[in-house]
Each structure stands twice: as C-alpha cells, then as structure tokens.
C-alpha cells in the first residue's frame, strides 16, 4: 500500500535541496476562497492568498474557473513539491453555493465519504479533515467580512480521477469510499517527512479500535502482510502497513492500546527492531551482523557458523548461513523483536507477538 504516493524503498538522496509543496487542504482552501469571492464580489481571486494554520501565507494560481447562475467553481492544481505524493498534479476543485447556516461541506466526484467510525470526521461525512474544514471556513469568513455578507456557503470539493488514485492509499481499508481524503494539518508538504505514512498508521489504529477489533497485524511490506493475514485470518481493516515506522506504530499504540498486536516482517528489518531500532529504513538503521552472531552463539551455533554469520555481507546471507548450520536464528530475532516492541509499549495492555517472513512469503519463525 502506498501512502501519499510515496514508496519508502524508492526514496533517494537528491543532489539539491528538496522543494516543499502544498497539502490538498491548502489547495482546496484557495479554490473555495476564490469561488466564494466570485459569488459575492463578481470576480475570481487569481492568484488567491490563504493563511496557513501555523502562520504565514501562500498564494495559488487558478487552473480552473467557472461561474454558473448561483454557483461558482474554482480549481487549483496541487503541487506537492519534491514529495512523491499520490495527489501531486491533481486538480482540486471547490464548487460554492451561497446559503445555509455557516460553512458546510459535501463530497463531489473523487472525494471520499467516511463509512467507519474512528476517523476525525463522522460516518456519512465527506472525508475532509478538521483542519482543512477550519481553513476553508476561515478563508470564506475573511472574504465575507470584506464584502459585508454572511459567511454562509455549501462547499463541494471534487478531485477528478480521485477514486482511482484512492486505490493507492489507505482509504479503502479505512472505510473511506468513493475517493481521496482532503488532508493537511500545516498546509505544507515536507518532502519525505514520513508524516503522511505515520498519519495513516494512526488512523488505521483508530478505525480498528472503533470497530472493537481484538487483534491487529502490522507489517513491514506487502509480502509479510499477505503471509500474516492468511495465517491469522484477519479482516482488511485489522491490517496496518507499518513500513519502516515501528516507532510511530508503537508510540501511538502505547497511548491507544488494542488487546493484541502481531508484527510481521522480513528477517532484515526485524533484526533491526530486535536490536532496538524503531526506524527500520536502510538509511537510518543497519543490520548488526556481530549481534546476530552473538545470538547464534546463544542458540548453540558452532564457531564456524558463528564466523560465517558475523562475516555475512547482508542479513539474508546471515540467515542462510544459520539455516545451513541448522541454527534457528530467525526464532532468536523474532523473540527479541517482540521483546523490543513490548519495551517500547511500556505498561500498555497490548499482547505482542512477531512473525518472521522470508522473501517467498513463508513464515520462518514466530516470537
């Protein structure tokens, strides 16, 4: 599963500073503000300036404008900067009608609707998160005050092609149907910040808790996820795509516990967790083959096997050396990974177990 369009394994180190971008919520705010201005003032704002949640402003050029008899629509193309965001380049449309009491929201084509409890907005609501809603309401209020009118408007957000794009996000699993979510807490997308991924992990936990699930499984990748789901028989919304972010998962679970957590992953990443690493990405933690060799000694490995494990160029080579010597190194890693997870959870009432999965999807150990 891809979060915000970013695959962590595809992350690279650029040869220039990374360029920040704008959240879907900031783009939607700009579009809604311009459309409301067209209705009450007779002209679209272009460029349109919006105030960001943590201070400062940003200006957006319109990519679309249309005026009807009692509705105005404005659109902004999302620029996510150098972050590989699934919505980069998407057209964010806001159609505004006057009336009602305050600012209300609706989901147009490509914007999802919430069908499960546990998310920041209620079941049946458009998947427009609280901060973008507040940004849009504030922007409309600013224009209304300038023109001496009431800030009463229905805002319908649409993202052409959003339903297809949403299949590359957590939305189907979280029970958001029909399209994308309109997100953003700061208005700014920080490239490779991991914030969107960790946000998705948290929302997955929230949905599982709201559904009363007694057991969730967090995986480091698609192979381990398939193996765990098949072995455990868990529903889709019990599966958490942890990726490299064990710390983000466990920190949130410590505050929002569930009865049971299974962590499933490849030998290399789980050996890092077993060593105490909470960010399992290759650029931020490494496999310690000397430590693997020490664990092999405890498992009864011969000196020759220990030397082969210590000299192994990769984690998989170390595992192969252990298997050749009939040493259950995978089980040792699984036990220690589970212990490291329990330690990070502290006193939270969460039962933890671990599945070590090889590249073919076979479960080679449980801890």
Image (cartoon, rainbow, N blue to C red):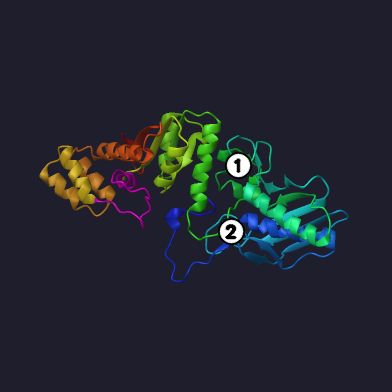
Which residue does the image show at 64% across and 41% down from the upper left? 121
Q: In which image quadrant can residue 176 be found? A: top right
List x then y, in percent, for residue 313: 24, 55
Give the position of the C terminus as an image quadrant: top left
- The rendered magenta stretch, by its main secondary structure, is classed as loop
Which residue, given by chain and number where applicable, does mark 1 sit on?
120
Q: In which image quadrant can residue 100 be found? A: top right
Q: Is residue 181 visible?
A: no
Q: Is residue 175 visible?
A: yes
Would residue 134 be found to the left or right of residue 223 on screen? right
What's the distance in space between the residues labelled 2 and 1, CA to CA? Answer: 20 Å
Answer few, some or many: residues within 10 Å of disc 1's Cα (few below 14, many 20 plus, some between 14 and 19).
some
State the SS at label 2.
loop
For residue 54, the mark is 2
Mark closer to the chain start, 2 or 1: 2
State the SS at label 1.
loop
List x then y, in percent, for residue 361: 38, 39
Would residue 299 be found to the left or right of residue 245 on screen? left
For discs 2 and 1, the disc positioned in front in the rendered view:
2
Q: Residue furthest right?
A: 69
List x then y, in percent, for residue 5: 54, 54
Q: Residue furthest left?
A: 303
* Residue 277 highlighted magenta (yes or no): yes
For the record, the magenta segment spans 268-288
Which residue does the image show at 43% across and 62% down from the upper left? 12
């Amino acid at each position: 599963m891809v979060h915000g369009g970013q695959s962590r394994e595809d992350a690279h180190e650029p040869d220039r500073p990374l360029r920040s971008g704008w959240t879907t919520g900031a783009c939607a705010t700009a579009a809604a503000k311009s459309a409301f201005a067209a209705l009450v003032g007779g002209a679209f704002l272009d460029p349109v300036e919006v105030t960001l949640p943590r201070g400062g402003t940003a200006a957006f050029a319109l990519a679309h404008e249309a005026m009807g008899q009692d509705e105005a629509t404005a659109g902004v193309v999302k620029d996510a900067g150098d972050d590989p965001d699934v919505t980069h380049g998407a057209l964010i449309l806001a159609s505004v009608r006057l009336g009602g009491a305050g600012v209300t929201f609706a989901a147009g084509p490509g914007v999802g609707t919430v069908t499960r409890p546990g998310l920041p907005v209620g079941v049946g609501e458009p998947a427009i998160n609280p901060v973008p809603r507040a940004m849009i309401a504030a922007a409309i209020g600013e224009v209304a005050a300038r023109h001496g009118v009431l800030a009463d408007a229905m805002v319908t957000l649409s993202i052409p092609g959003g339903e297809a794009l949403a299949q590359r996000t957590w939305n189907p699993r979280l029970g958001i149907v029909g399209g994308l979510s309109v997100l953003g807490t700061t208005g700014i997308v920080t490239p490779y910040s991991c914030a969107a991924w960790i946000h998705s992990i948290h929302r997955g936990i929230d949905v599982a808790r709201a559904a009363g699930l007694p057991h969730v499984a967090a995986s480091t990748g698609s192979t381990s996820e398939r193996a765990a789901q098949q072995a455990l028989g868990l529903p889709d919304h019990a599966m958490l795509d942890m990726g490299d972010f064990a710390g983000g998962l466990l920190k949130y679970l410590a505050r929002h516990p569930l009865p049971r957590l299974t962590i499933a992953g490849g030998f290399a990443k789980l050996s890092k967790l077993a060593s105490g690493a909470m960010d399992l990405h290759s650029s931020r933690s490494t496999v310690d083959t000397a430590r693997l060799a020490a664990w092999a000694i405890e498992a009864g490995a011969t000196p020759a096997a220990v030397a082969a494990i210590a000299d192994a160029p990769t984690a998989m080579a170390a595992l192969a050396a252990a298997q050749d010597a009939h040493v259950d190194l995978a089980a040792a890693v699984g036990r220690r990974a589970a212990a490291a997870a329990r330690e990070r959870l502290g006193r939270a009432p969460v039962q933890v177990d671990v599945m070590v999965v090889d590249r073919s999807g076979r479960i080679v150990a449980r801890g």
